Amino acid sequence: MTPKFRIVALVEAVSFLILLAMVIVKRGFDGPDLVQVMGPIHGIAFIAYFFLTLAVRAEQGWTGGQTNPVLVASALPFGAAV
């Protein structure tokens, strides 16, 4: 696995956790609406992760069955960074 892939996976995971925290702050505590800021940041990180996964798939020779869990793992905080 390339270091670039690990970094992007970690950024994606951290941005997802921050986004979830911002939703809780906004909805649960009527805090500032930082979701509008964090949402696009996480979206860009997720898109980068998705396309980098496809690039790593080609480099590593992964099958679809090996690639799908990697993509699904991105839906779990820090699932992709492991």
Image (cartoon, grey):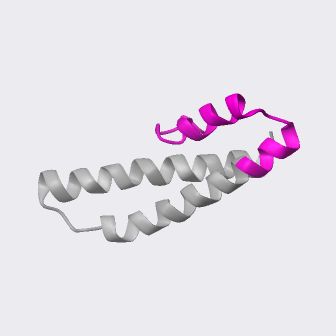
**Frontmost residue, 40 versus 34:** 40
**Frontmost residue, 77 versus 53:** 53
Q: Residue at point 60% right, 31% down? A: 69
Judge whether 25 appears above or below 13 on screen.
below
Q: Residue at point 55% right, 55% down? A: 46
- Count the numbered circles shown: 0
Can the viewer see residue 5 in this picture? Answer: yes
**Frontmost residue, 56 versus 16:** 56
Return the residue found at the far front.
64
**Magenta region, residue range:** 54-82
Q: Residue at point 52% right, 38% down? A: 78
Judge whether 65 appears above or below 37 on screen.
above
80 relative to 43 in the view: left or right: right
Q: Quadrant of residue 6?
A: top right
Q: Is residue 74 magenta?
A: yes
Question: x, y percentage for residue 62?
Answer: 79, 34
Can the viewer see residue 82 in this picture? Answer: no
Q: Is residue 76 magenta?
A: yes
**Frontmost residue, 57 versus 82:** 57
Judge whether 23 appears above or below 64 on screen.
below
72 relative to 27 in the view: left or right: right
Q: Residue at point 54% right, 42% down? A: 74
Quadrant where the N terminus lies?
Answer: top right
Question: x, y percentage for residue 12?
Answer: 55, 52
18 relative to 69 in the view: left or right: left
Question: x, y percentage for residue 47?
Answer: 58, 59
Quadrant where the C terminus lies?
Answer: top right
Question: x, y percentage for residue 5?
Answer: 73, 48
